Image (spheres, helix red, strand yellow):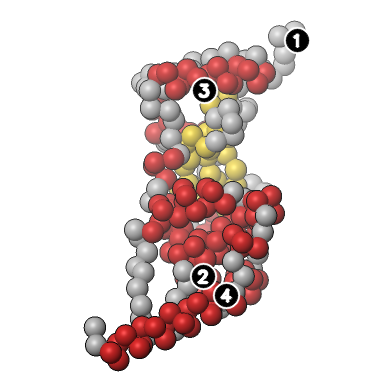
C-alpha cells in the first residue's frame, strides 16, 4: 500500500471513530435490564450468540460510499424493530440512519437469521432430551407424557393484492398469515410453519405439516396438547367438551 492509500485509510478510520463516538452505543448506554426491555435479548446473547451467526453472511469492507453501518448496529436495528414494531422512521431516528437503510437492514438481517432456523427451532434430537421435556411438562401441571403444546396465531399483513388476495383474509376480517407453533415446557419454539394464508383452518395446517408425520411415525416421544380446533388423535389430545368429573 503506497503512502497516499495509507493516508486515505487512516482518514477513514478517523471518520469512523468519530461516527461511533458521536453515535450512542446501546451496549454501553443501557444496563442489562434496560437493554433486554428494548431488544428482548441480553447483551451476552446478542454479542456472543446471535452476532457470530450472521457475520459470515455480511460483506464487511471499506468503500467510498460514506460510513458503513457496523454489523452490531445492523443487528440491533433489526432486533429493535422486531421488539417494538415501530415505524422504520422511528427506528432509524434512534440509530441516526435513514428509513431506507432501516428497510434494507431489516431485510438483510431477517434473511440471515432465517437461514439459521433449523439449527435452533427443532424438537430434541435424542430420546433422553425428549424424555427431559416430558418431565418438565409434567412438573408444570402434573400432566403426563406431554412433549409439546400446539396452536396457531394470525400474523397481520398488508393486502397482498392480486386474484388470490381474499384467501389471506381471516375469519376476523383482516389479512394475515396463519402461523402454526409447537411450544416446549420453557415456552421455547420447537416447530413452526409459516406459509398458510389467514383463511386456512388450524387443523388443515397441522394435516399438511411435517410435525404430524413425525408424531405418526413415532419419531417424537410423547403427546401434543391442542385446543378444540384440532381433531383428537392418539398423539394429539384436545379438551373434553362436556366433562362430567373433575378429572
- Depth check, mark 2 against mark 1: the one in front is 2
Q: Which residue is mark 4?
A: 21
- Depth check, mark 4 against mark 3: the one in front is 4
Q: Give the CA separation, mark 1 to mark 4.
A: 64 Å
Q: Which residue is mark 1?
A: 246
202 left or right of 38? left
Can you see residue 155?
Answer: no
Answer with the quarter of the image where residue 89 lies.
bottom right
Disc nearer the start of the sequence (4/3): 4
Disc nearer the start of the sequence (2/1): 2
Vertical placement of 100 versus 183: above or below?
below
Label 3 with label 1: CB-CB less than 8 Å: no
Q: Quadrant of the C terminus?
A: top right
Answer with the quarter of the image where residue 88 lies.
bottom right
Residue at (40, 56) in percent of width and height: 54
Q: Give the CA separation, mark 2 to mark 3.
A: 39 Å
Q: Residues within 10 Å of mark 2 (few under 14, many from 20)?
A: some
Label 2 with label 1: CB-CB less than 8 Å: no
135 left or right of 13? right
Badge 1 marks a residue whose secondary structure is loop
Q: Give the CA separation, mark 4 to mark 3.
A: 46 Å
Q: Which residue is mark 2?
A: 103
Disc nearer the start of the sequence (1/4): 4
Disc nearer the start of the sequence (4/2): 4
Residue 188: x percent and y percent?
55, 36
Residue 243: x percent and y percent?
72, 13
Vertical placement of 114 versus 180: above or below?
below
Residue at (52, 33) in percent of width and height: 182
Residue 53: x percent and y percent?
40, 52
Q: Which residue is mark 3?
A: 133
Q: Quadrant of the N terminus?
A: bottom left
Amino acid at each position: 500500500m503506497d503512502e497516499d492509500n495509507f493516508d486515505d485509510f487512516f482518514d477513514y478510520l478517523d471518520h469512523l471513530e468519530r461516527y461511533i463516538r458521536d453515535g450512542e452505543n446501546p451496549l454501553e448506554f443501557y444496563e442489562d435490564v434496560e437493554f433486554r426491555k428494548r431488544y428482548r435479548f441480553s447483551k451476552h446473547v446478542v454479542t456472543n450468540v446471535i452476532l457470530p451467526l450472521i457475520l459470515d453472511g455480511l460483506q464487511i469492507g471499506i468503500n467510498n460510499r460514506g460510513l458503513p453501518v457496523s454489523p452490531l448496529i445492523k443487528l440491533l436495528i433489526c432486533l429493535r424493530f422486531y421488539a417494538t414494531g415501530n415505524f422504520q422512521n422511528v427506528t432509524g431516528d434512534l440509530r441516526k440512519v435513514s428509513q431506507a437503510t432501516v428497510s434494507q437492514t431489516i431485510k438483510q438481517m431477517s434473511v440471515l437469521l432465517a437461514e439459521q432456523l433449523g439449527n435452533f427451532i427443532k424438537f430434541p434430537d435424542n430420546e433422553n432430551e425428549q424424555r427431559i421435556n416430558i418431565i418438565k411438562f409434567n412438573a408444570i401441571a402434573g400432566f403426563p407424557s406431554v412433549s409439546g403444546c400446539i396452536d396457531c396465531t394470525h400474523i397481520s399483513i398488508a393486502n397482498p393484492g392480486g386474484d388470490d388476495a381474499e384467501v389471506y383474509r381471516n375469519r376476523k376480517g383482516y389479512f394475515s398469515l396463519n402461523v402454526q407453533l409447537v411450544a416446549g415446557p420453557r415456552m421455547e419454539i420447537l416447530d413452526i410453519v409459516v406459509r398458510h394464508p389467514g383463511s386456512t383452518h388450524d387443523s388443515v395446517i397441522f394435516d399438511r405439516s411435517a410435525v404430524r408425520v413425525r408424531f405418526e411415525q413415532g419419531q417424537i416421544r410423547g403427546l401434543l396438547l391442542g385446543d378444540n380446533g384440532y381433531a383428537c388423535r392418539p398423539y394429539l389430545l384436545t379438551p373434553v367438551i362436556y366433562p362430567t368429573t373433575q378429572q
